Amino acid sequence: MEKAVPFSVVLTLPATGSEMNSGSVISRRATKEKLSFGSPLLFPKCSVLDPTVIQSLPNRQIVNGVVDSFVHVLEQYMTYPAGAALQDRFAEGILQTLLEVGEKVVADPKDYVAASNFMWACTMALNGLISQGVPTDWGVHGIGHELTALFGIDHARTLAIVAPRYYEHCFENKKEKLAQYAERVWGISEGNLEEKAHKAIKKTEQFFQSLGVDTKLSAYTKDYEGTAEKIANRFTERGWLGIGEHRNVTPNDVLLILKETY
């Protein structure tokens, strides 16, 4: 991309951080594909964030915003220790804020304080701040996009389906950060490192479910058989042979992860 039309943003749906980032996705219904792209030219020139606008949103979309922004942070945090103490604290602070205000804003979108903190947390979750100097993953998103493309499932809900199973499958690579997340975000102090890490995955899934979000693919479609194979084949055809922070999550791993989501 060599140039782009300058634009500004009036935020109407807090979730993806588009008001302060340069990322986008394009969906093509004819081929059931959803792919991401971005460019430094695609940052808004200015953005207007008014928390009162969420009062007009369907409850489903507010829930989606909470889940989407939560997983945005996890994608940039749930990797391995990199000695980036402040970056970790930034990420953990956003996660804690979403836990504190998420249920409040879902229950009462007119709560201006909760809505303000929710909207700002969504922005900070994906504006480039917490990704500086640390490894990032984005495998959950890569897989989740395929579920939206194939079945039309809301983006945030695909993340809720994939994330718990993805972290379980990649447990050995992520257990140190999972345990840190357990301690600092969920206040889990009992158990050894592995036990804390497993509890953190469970707590995350329970949080999504507490917002009314199903975490199994079978809750959204009866036509889930063969989905794992289809998506794994797509990854292979595109040359996506290794995703994740270590680039070691193969199409076969994707297949196994998705089978666990059924």
Image (cartoon, rainbow, N blue to C red):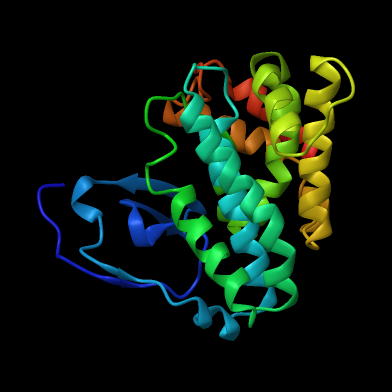
- Residue 46, image x, y percentages: 24, 66
Residue 66 sits in which quadrant?
Answer: bottom right
Q: Quadrant of residue 170?
A: top right
Q: Residue at x 52, y 54 (%)?
A: 32
In this rendering, the answer to whether 251 lies above or below 58 is above
Q: Is residue 214 shown left or right of residue 27?
A: right
Let me know if residue 128 appears in the view. Answer: yes
| The one of 112 and 14 positioned closer to us in this rendering | 112
151 or 198: nearer the viewer: 198
- 149 shown above or below 171: below
In the rendered image, the residue lying farthest to the right is: 190
Q: Position of residue 31 (x, y in %)?
A: 48, 53
In the rendered structure, the answer to whether residue 100 lies left or right of residue 43 reads: right
| Number of marks in the rendered image | 0
Q: Residue at x 56, y 78 (%)?
A: 54
Residue drawn at point x = 74 percent, y = 37 percent? 164
| Any part of residue 262 in sight | no
Seen in the picture, residue 104 relative to 188 is either above or below; the reply is below
Q: Is residue 94 above or below residue 187?
A: below
- Write the residue at 42% across / 47% down: 35
Residue 110 picture location, percent across and down: 63, 83
Q: In which quadrant is the C terminus drawn?
A: top right
Question: x, y (%) of residue 149?
Answer: 55, 54
Furthest residue in direction left, as rendered? 2
Q: Residue furthest bottom?
A: 56
